[in-house]
Amino acid sequence: GPSVVWFRDDLRLADNPALRAALDRDEPVIGLYVLDEESSGIRPLGEAARWWLHHSLTSLGERLRERGGALVLRRGPADRVVRETVSDAAAGAVFWNRRYGGPEREADAGLKSALRADSVEVSSFAASLLFEPWTVRTGAGTPFSVFTPFWRACLALPAPRAPLAEPREIAGPGRTPASDSLGDWALLPTRPDWAGGLRETWEPGEPAARRRLQEFLRDDLAQYDRARDEPGAGATSLLSPRLRWGELSPHTVWHETVEAGAGGRFLSELGWREFAWHVLFHHPDLARRNLRPEFDAFPWPRLQPTHLDAWQRGRTGVALVDAGMKQLWHTGYMHNRVRMVAASFLVKNLLIDWRRGEEWFWDTLVDADAANNPFNWQWVAGSGADAAPYFRIFNPQLQARKFDPDGHYVREWAPEHLGEDSPEPIVDLGETRKAALDAYEHVKRAA
Ligand code: FAD
């Protein structure tokens, strides 16, 4: 019978080992995507992510159909829905690319045994990471908790495999199993439609992702090392949502970057993505629990909702923070340097728990990533793996002077800060810095 390819965080045809395995089986191929908002432990997608998913699935479905294939959309708990689809299609095999989150791995393992018990062939593949988490170990056989030796160990392993070519033809099934229509999933915002800025900024889908990679390698890679920290320079790849949704594989990015020459610094940023997933794999509750448990003793003051609200809306009175939070709200993206400054301001000047910030980013980022987001929040908060030392508190005004010296970025996103009566910070930066350092004393005592 037909082969089912269960697409998850790999919405692409090129370099897709699960799809390749299905094609090699010489039976009709059915693509499947399951919107699972029910299985326990699976974190529901944020709003910006749902917007991206809608468009990326539209693109994937078109591309499969153009080649003769099909994409079936189903909603519900994945363990039930995948088995139903297999039985509706009388499929003989199911292929997928592996996921690395705790609940996802459990679900996949359970499904694998259930399908095999039904005599369905099942295989899973490495496709979303260059180095699967369990393949990278310290000399003592333990996971890594510091980036530099982690990445050195990765680079000492055999180089990532070459990407697989994109299939030209895909034999579809004679009869396609019933599919939901994407519109019924209501992934797009309607009232109000806040996605105008996202539409202006992004084109989801594999073809646009590939074009962006080419453009970045041709126009921006050479200035990446020098300008990557300047939010106004436009020097970074903007590949994060494409990697998040798997419209591009990291293998493709890796190999094309190496062919384009140099790029060590850029490749090491891909390394941070690998590291965040390595850490999540070994600490599945990364979004909820401090990696360094002494941070549980941090005396968070009572939440000031007006402060959280001002931060979310970009009304803190601090230029770089406001610019970043407005870029985020408008486009679903924020430059990395500004993410660090805005996150630091929330945690160390407003003294709001990093988890509130992580949740907001989860909801508003188009690249909201189950590993990268909590990993980086914990990095900023000082509670994470290889984190910034807590006492090194960013001064957002100095950061702006250093990384946005001509004010390009602030002018674009928060021009109100450049006029005569620019807003005042809602908290005193010096006093709050001192309060944060005092609070940190509790953590030190708990260590
Ligand atoms: P480039 O500089 O071109 O980097 C290339 C790729 O490397 C990125 O696309 C990304 O996949 C990876 N990468 C770069 N920096 C990091 C990093 N620090 N950690 C992990 N991977 C990295 N990135 C996400 O993809 N999803 C998130 O949800 C996310 N949340 C973040 C939250 C905070 C508080 C901070 C400080 C950073 C967060 N990042 C997140 C990391 C980083 O800001 C983005 O990956 C980056 O800004 C994306 O832009 P780019 O693709 O142009 O990056």
Image: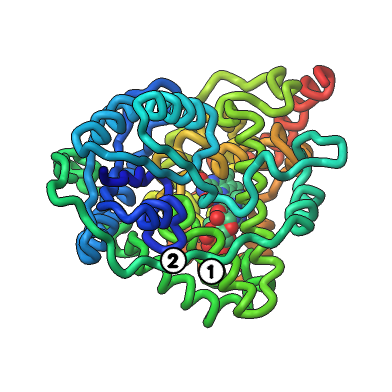
The residue pinned by badge 2 equals 412
Question: Under 8 Å from ligand 1: the CB of mark 1?
Answer: no
Give left or right: position of 269 versus 292: left
**Image point (21%, 55%), residue name:** 172
**Image point (24%, 65%), residue name:** 67
Residue 391 appears in the picture as rendered: yes
Query: Which x, y percent locates residue 44?
Result: 38, 32
Give left or right: position of 160 versus 116: right
The first of marks 1 and 2 along the sequence is: 1
Which quadrant is the C terminus positioned in?
top right
Query: Which x, y percent locates residue 212?
Result: 44, 71
Outermost right residue = 139
Q: Amino acid at mark 1?
A: Gly
At numbered mark 2, what does the secondary structure look like: helix, strand or loop? Answer: helix
Q: Amino acid at mark 2?
A: Glu
Give left or right: position of 180 versus 395: left
